[in-house]
Image (spheres, rainbow, N blue to C red):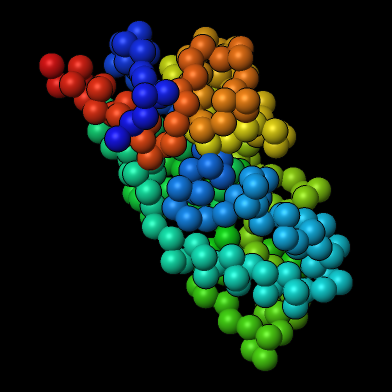
C-alpha cells in the first residue's frame, strides 16, 4: 500500500494522462527493492570492498581472479532476485504510453520484467566481453580452477559493465538523451543523480519542456528544481500511479 507521504497530486495524474512518451530513469534504489544491495547506501557493497580494486580495468588486469570472484558473487545475488512491483508497473505503463527505460542498473531486471525498450547506461552483468577483440559472450562463463576465462584470441574475458574511468557503451547515452528530449514526462526513480553523465539526463528533459518527477525514499536526494517529488518506494508509488492513470485512460 502506498504510504501517506507519497500522496499523488491530481494535477500530476492529469498531466500524465495527457502524455504520450514517458521515460523511466532508474537507479540502484529500484534494484534494492529486489534485494540487491546498493553501492552507496548504509548497507552498500562499496563499504565492504574498494571500488578501485573491483571496478577498475587496471586493477582487473593486475588481479583478475579477485575481480571475477567478486562478479560471480554479485551474479549469484542477482540470479536469486526477481523483478519487483516497481519493475512490473513500468511494464504496465506500456499499455497506454510509449515507454523508454533508461537504467544505471546492470542487473537485467527490467528485461526480465518484460520492458520492451531498455537503454543500459552501465552495461549488463549477465554479459561478458573480451578485453582485446571485444567479442560478446551471453552464456554463463565458468571459472575453471578459479581462473578467469579467456577468449579464443587468448585475451582475458571481463564482465560487460562500465568500470570507473571508462566511457559508456557507444551510442547508448546519445539515445538516452534523445529519448529525454522527446518525452512528455520523465520519472527519475531510485537514484540520487550523482553519477555523471547520467545525472544530466533530467536536465535534458526539463530543457525540452518535459515534466520531471522524482520518486525516492530519501527526500534529501531530491533536486528541488524538479516539478514534482513523490516520496516512497518504486514498488509502492509506480503501481499507484498506474492505477490512477488507468482509470482516466479507460474512462
The C terminus sits in image quarter: top left
The answer to which of 198 and 152 lies nearer the viewer is 198
Query: Which residue occupies 62% across, 27% down?
Result: 221
User: Extreme bottom residue here?
Assistant: 145
Direction left: furthest residue = 251
Whether residue 102 can be seen here: no
Residue at (48, 55) in percent of width and height: 35
Tell me if residue 123 comes above or below residue 118 in the rendering.
Answer: below
From the viewer's perspective, tell me whether residue 21 is left or right of residue 151: left
The structure residue drawn at horizontal position 61% and vertical position 12%, both measured from the top left corner, is: 225
Q: Position of residue 240 (x, y in %)?
A: 30, 29
- Quick one: 179 or 191, which is closer to the camera? 191
Q: Position of residue 104 (x, y in %)?
A: 59, 43
- Determine the residue positioned at 45% across, 48% down: 33
> Residue 208: x and y, percent?
55, 12
Q: Where is 194 relative to 112, above or below?
A: above
Q: Can you tell which quarter of the image residue 86 is in?
A: top left
Q: Is residue 210 above or below residue 49?
A: above
Q: Is residue 212 left or right of residue 199?
A: left
Q: Nearer the viewer, residue 193 or 17?
A: 193
Residue 163 visible to an observer of this rendering: yes
Q: Please state the horizontal and vertical placement of residue 177, each as a whole percent of the image.
A: 59, 28
Image quadrant holding the N terminus, namely: top left
Amino acid at each position: 500500500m502506498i504510504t501517506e507521504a507519497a500522496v499523488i497530486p491530481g494535477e500530476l495524474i492529469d498531466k500524465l494522462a495527457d502524455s504520450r512518451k514517458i521515460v523511466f530513469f532508474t537507479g540502484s534504489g529500484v534494484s534494492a527493492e529486489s534485494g540487491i544491495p546498493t553501492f552507496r547506501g548504509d548497507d552498500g557493497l562499496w563499504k565492504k570492498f574498494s571500488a578501485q580494486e573491483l571496478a577498475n580495468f587496471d586493477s582487473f588486469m593486475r588481479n583478475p581472479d579477485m575481480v571475477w570472484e567478486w562478479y560471480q558473487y554479485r551474479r549469484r545475488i542477482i540470479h536469486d532476485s526477481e523483478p519487483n512491483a516497481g519493475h512490473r508497473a513500468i511494464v504496465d505503463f506500456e499499455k497506454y504510453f510509449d515507454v523508454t527505460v533508461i537504467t544505471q542498473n546492470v542487473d537485467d531486471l527490467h528485461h526480465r520484467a518484460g520492458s520492451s525498450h531498455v537503454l543500459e547506461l552501465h552495461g549488463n552483468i549477465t554479459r561478458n566481453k573480451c578485453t582485446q577483440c571485444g567479442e560478446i559472450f551471453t552464456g554463463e562463463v565458468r571459472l575453471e580452477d578459479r581462473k578467469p576465462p579467456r577468449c579464443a584470441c587468448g585475451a582475458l574475458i571481463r564482465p560487460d559493465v562500465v568500470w570507473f574511468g571508462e566511457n559508456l557503451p557507444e551510442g547508448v547515452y546519445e539515445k538516452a538523451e534523445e529519448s529525454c528530449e522527446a518525452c512528455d514526462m520523465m520519472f527519475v526513480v531510485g537514484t540520487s543523480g550523482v553519477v555523471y553523465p547520467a545525472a544530466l539526463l533530467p536536465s535534458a528533459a526539463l530543457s525540452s519542456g518535459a515534466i520531471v518527477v522524482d520518486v525516492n525514499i530519501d527526500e534529501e536526494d531530491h533536486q528541488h528544481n524538479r516539478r514534482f517529488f513523490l516520496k516512497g518506494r518504486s514498488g509502492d508509488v509506480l503501481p499507484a500511479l498506474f492505477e490512477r492513470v488507468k482509470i482516466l485512460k479507460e474512462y
